[in-house]
């Protein structure tokens, strides 16, 4: 079942360091079967009081693939760039399975 990483980057404190992370991370994502569906772009709040920052949505073929990427040496070698440069909230959500609609 497909699995999604949804990230809300709420504060970028070091633009250069964050840009380095943004440049390096796609290769690590792709190595684990992930693909970007959303990477930045304009947002519009339709309901509630959420104030999203920079939104990122990455699709992985499975929860295992996403977890393997997150724990991988490739990602661990660069995650410090994001952690030092920005504040973000991230969640994992499973997609709809095969068969009847969700």
Image (spheres, helix red, strand yellow):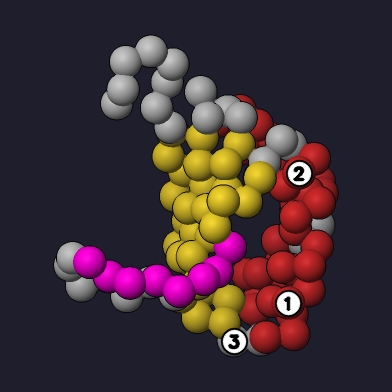
Tell me where residue 41 appears, x and y as whole percent. 51, 71
Range of magenta residues: 39-46
Look at the image and say whether residue 44 sits in the magenta stretch: yes
Residue 55 shows in the view: yes
Closest to the observer: 3 or 84? 3
Tell me where residue 65 appears, x and y as whole percent. 65, 31
Closest to the observer: 30 or 86? 30
Residue 38 occupies which quadrant of the picture?
bottom right
Seen at 52% across and 30% down, the residue is 2
Residue topped by disc 1: 19
Residue topped by disc 3: 13
Distance between mark 3 and mark 2 Cα atoms: 26 Å
Seen at 74% across and 37% down, the residue is 32
Of the residues tagged 3 and 2, which is closer to the observer? 2
What SS does tag 3 mark?
loop
Residue topped by disc 2: 30
Q: Is residue 47 left or right of residue 42?
A: left
What SS does tag 2 mark?
helix
Distance between mark 1 and mark 2 Cα atoms: 18 Å
What SS does tag 1 mark?
helix
Tell me which numbered mark, 1 or 2, is placed earlier along the sequence.
1
């Amino acid at each position: 079942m497909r699995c999604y990483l949804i990230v809300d980057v709420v504060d970028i404190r070091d633009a250069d360091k964050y840009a380095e992370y943004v440049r390096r991370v796609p290769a690590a994502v792709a190595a684990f079967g992930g693909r970007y569906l959303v990477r930045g772009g304009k947002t519009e709040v339709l309901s509630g009081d959420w104030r999203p920052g920079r939104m990122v949505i990455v699709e992985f073929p499975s929860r295992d693939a996403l977890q393997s990427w997150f724990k991988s040496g490739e990602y661990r070698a660069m995650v410090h760039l994001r952690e030092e440069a920005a504040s973000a909230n991230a969640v994992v959500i499973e997609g709809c399975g095969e068969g009847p609609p969700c």
